[in-house]
Image: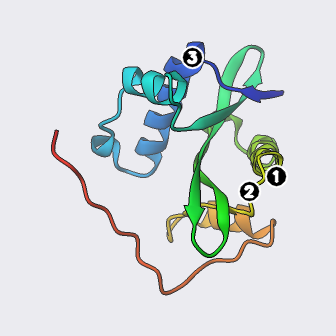
Amino acid sequence: MTIRKGTPADVPQLFELVQELALYEKAPHEVTNTPEQMLKDGFGDNPLFGVLVAEIENKIVAMSLYYYRYSTWKGKRLYLEDIIVNESFRGRGLGKALFDATIAEGRKTDCTGMMWQVLDWNEPAIQFYKQFNTRFDTGWWNCHLDFDK
């Protein structure tokens, strides 16, 4: 396994992983992003996200997509948007290796910590995050406002 930063050439495989995650979360109809938009947003003049990939035999089998946010209380934070491991490669340590690499990226870029979300029904993910001494917040609700194009 090799972990490296993603490149523009990786976008088609990254988008396949995004679609796989949407199926797992029973929400494929919610994906409105496109490979073209990911290419522009992640690898254009002003990248909005970073991505780490895990490869086995030159095939991307997992990814960690992150970006930076700012907390008035905590300062610069790394926000882990998604960590996705292809279903046939789960249980081999890829998720942990990517998670550790994402933490290292946050430390390298002077973040004060890392944040992410997990669905309350995703027990395998919750158990995975517990091994890192994760603090699970209560009392906060996720809020969303979608803009029409």
Q: Secondary structure at mark 3?
A: helix
Amino acid carrying label 2: it is Cys
Disc 2 designates what residue? 111
Q: With 14 as the anchor, is 31 left or right in this view?
A: left
User: Looking at the image, is mark 2 or mark 3 earlier in the sequence?
Assistant: 3
| Cα–Cα gap, marks 3 and 1 | 24 Å
Look at the image and tell me whether residue 86 can be seen. no
Q: Quadrant of the N terminus?
A: top right
Amino acid of disc 3: Pro
- In the rendering, which numbered label is found on residue 107? 1
Q: Quarter of the image holding residue 77? A: bottom right
- Disc 2 from disc 3: Cα separation: 25 Å
The mark that comes first in sequence, 3 or 1, is 3
Instruction: Tell me whether circle 3 and circle 1 mark residues in contact (CB < 8 Å).
Output: no
Quadrant housing residue 92: top right
Where residue 86 appears, as percent x and y from the top left, is 61, 35
Q: Is residue 72 above or below residue 117?
A: below
